[in-house]
Image (cartoon, rainbow, N blue to C red):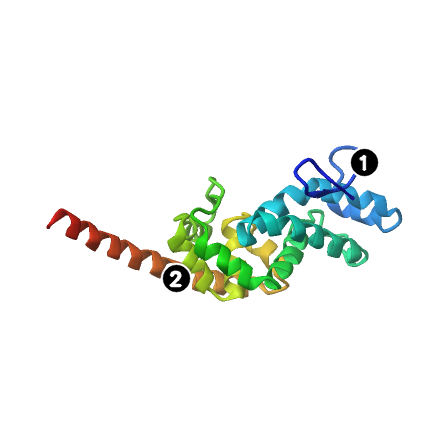
């Protein structure tokens, strides 16, 4: 490992057998030659860093990315070779790492003025609803996210921010798809309730200011 120009941990990557080699193949080869795992870091570290930065802030994210990939490296022997894409596995590890810093995460939500936006593309109706809950990117939503249980928040943010499917979230968190749906529905309702209440308050304040 070395630090890149931004002070983040990075790794030099060995040559790969083509640009389209899937993650499972790379991880499999890394069990025989550990240097190959660097390609997994190079491929996915930016996404994992973005996810962690949204949850705990950029400064702490730098350290947690390194921790996430160190854990992944140590657990690579147990990786399921039938899963070509390692992202759900890595997001699952990163989410567990975040859970150890819950207080920092909640402070980040309460005091951040803006949170990075969710992806522009909309998919399934349930995902649209989740994204609607995550689009009011300001202190009000931050407070709402801080009030969610850790488990509900994990599901909401993996769907709304990281664009994972229900099946991928289930893989990441080691829970059934039905549990993903129920947690997402609960988180969505709670965040909507806060946003609706805030909208009503804002409307009343506007009426007072206008003397109506």
Residue 91 disc label: none
Residue 21 position by quadrant: top right
Query: How far across and down, in percent of the image, does residue 99 sit?
Result: 60, 63
- Mark 1: which secondary structure? loop
Quadrant location of the N terminus in the rendered image: top right
Q: Residue furthest right?
A: 32
Instruction: Look at mark 1 in the image and give the residue it sits on.
Output: 16
The quadrant where residue 16 appears: top right
Q: Which residue is mark 2?
A: 189
Q: In the picture, residue 177 is in which quadrant?
A: bottom right
- Where is residue 88? Give x, y as percent: 64, 52
**Dot 2, crowdedness within 10 Å: few (<14), some or many (≥20)?**
some
Report whether 163 appears left or right of 49.
Answer: left
Closer to the camera in the image, 147 or 104: 104
Please name the residue shown 40% across and 53% down the image.
Answer: 139
Left or right of 168, for residue 11: right
How crowded is the residue under tag 1: few (<14 C-alpha within 10 Å), some, or many (20+)? Answer: few
Label 2, label 1: how far apart the Cα atoms are? 46 Å
Q: Position of residue 160 (x, y in %)?
A: 49, 50
Residue 127 x %, y %: 46, 51
Q: Is residue 196 visible?
A: yes
Residue 178 in view in this figure: no
């Amino acid at each position: 490992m070395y630090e890149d120009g931004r002070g983040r941990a990075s790794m030099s990557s060995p040559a790969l057998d083509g640009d389209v080699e899937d993650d499972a193949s790379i991880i499999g080869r890394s069990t025989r030659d550990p240097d190959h795992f660097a390609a997994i870091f190079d491929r996915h570290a930016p996404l994992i860093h973005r996810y962690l930065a949204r949850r705990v802030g950029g400064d702490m994210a730098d350290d947690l990315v390194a921790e996430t990939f160190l854990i992944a490296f140590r657990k690579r022997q147990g990786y399921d070779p039938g899963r070509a894409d390692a992202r759900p596995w890595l997001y699952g590890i990163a989410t567990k790492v975040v859970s150890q810093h819950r207080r920092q995460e909640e402070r980040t939500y309460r005091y951040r003025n803006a949170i990075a936006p969710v992806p522009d593309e909309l998919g399934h109706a349930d995902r649209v609803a989740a994204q609607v809950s995550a689009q009011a990117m300001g202190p009000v939503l931050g407070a709402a996210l801080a009030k969610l249980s850790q488990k509900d928040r994990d599901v909401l943010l993996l769907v709304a921010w990281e664009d994972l499917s229900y099946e991928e979230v289930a893989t990441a968190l080691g829970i059934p798809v039905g549990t993903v749906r129920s947690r997402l529905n609960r988180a969505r309702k709670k965040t909507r309730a806060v946003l609706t209440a805030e909208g009503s308050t804002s409307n009343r304040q506007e009426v007072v200011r206008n003397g109506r």
